[in-house]
């Protein structure tokens, strides 16, 4: 598949975190299945799930040929939030996977990226930076974690165990912790074209459509990037 990096989809069918509004497990299950079907055309997919849902008994998740289903127990740390649990699961996956891919593109498992062809091709051709992520311009202290590309070597060296510094109940989110780490480490850049993501936000329960205003905002961001504005490098 054009030497594309592996795709890692993180999932929690039955939510187990504070500040979560999108909690319908039936709808979430369908979103995950749709996402798997969408992404499995590009590369091998690792689907990581960490809730009390009987994933191993659901045949629909096993109908895809190049998708690896990985089931993890629910996190014991409920109040620390979704980001804590997600990166805790990523750590467990890396420590338990027999044949870990050398590089991978991680996505929140329910979201669809409209311009994914360009995004994954960019990741496949990356040979200088060890991680590609997105930052929010406002506030600038936040790095998005719904999508990022990373090498396993970089993750194990700099991001392993980073979830332990997260506590949503104190407004110390994974996005803040990751941004602080990347600022100190370097080796990271933004996507050349900001990913256009659609789906239901887990925190607010609101659908994120790709509207004219969002497209315009992404076009402005992309123009600034090509103009080499300083926020190009995290």
Image: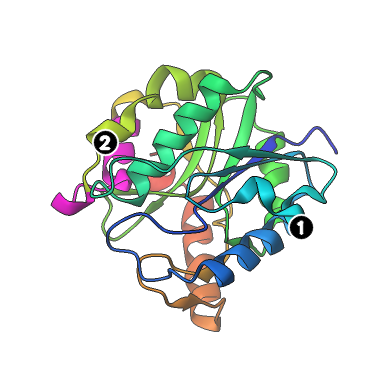
* Residue on which disc 2 sits: 180
In the rendered image, residue 155 lying in the magenta stretch gets the answer no
- Quadrant showing the N terminus: top right
215 sits to left or right of 59: left
- Which type of secondary structure does the marked residue at label 1 adopt? helix
Estimate how packed mark 2 is, as few (under 14), some (14 to 19) or many (20 or more) residues with alpha carbons within 10 Å.
Answer: some
116 lies left or right of 75: right
Residue at the bottom extreme of this rendering: 212
Distance between the alpha carbons at the discs numbered 1 and 2: 34 Å
Name the residue carrying label 1: 37
Q: How many marks are shown on the rendered structure?
A: 2
Of tags 1 and 2, the one toward the viewer is: 1
Image quarter in which the C terminus is found: top left
Question: Is 72 positioned to the left or the right of 83 in the image?
Answer: right
Q: Residue at x 56, y 49 (%)?
A: 107
Question: Residue 24, position in %: x, y?
Answer: 48, 71
């Amino acid at each position: 598949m054009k030497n594309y990096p592996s795709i890692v989809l993180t999932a929690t069918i039955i939510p187990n975190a504070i500040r979560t509004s999108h909690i319908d497990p039936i709808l979430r299950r369908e979103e995950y299945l749709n996402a798997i079907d969408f992404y499995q055309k590009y590369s091998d997919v690792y689907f990581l799930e960490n809730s009390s849902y009987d994933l191993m008994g659901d045949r629909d998740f096993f109908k895809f040929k190049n998708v690896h289903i990985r089931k993890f127990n629910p996190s014991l740390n409920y109040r620390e939030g979704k980001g804590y649990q997600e990166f805790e699961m990523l750590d467990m996956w890396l420590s338990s996977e027999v044949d870990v891919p050398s590089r991978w593109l991680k996505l929140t498992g329910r979201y669809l990226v409209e311009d994914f062809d360009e995004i994954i091709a960019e990741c496949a051709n990356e040979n200088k930076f060890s991680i590609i992520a997105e930052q929010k311009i406002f506030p600038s202290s936040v790095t998005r974690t719904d999508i990022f590309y990373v090498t396993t070597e970089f993750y194990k060296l700099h991001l392993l165990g980073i979830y332990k510094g997260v506590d949503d109940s104190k407004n110390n989110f994974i996005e803040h912790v990751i941004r602080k780490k990347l600022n100190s480490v370097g080796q990271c850049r933004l996507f050349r074209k900001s990913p256009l993501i659609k789906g239901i936000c887990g925190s607010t329960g609101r659908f994120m459509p790709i509207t004219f205003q969002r497209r315009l905002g992404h076009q402005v961001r992309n123009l600034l990037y090509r103009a080499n504005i300083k926020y190009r490098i995290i």
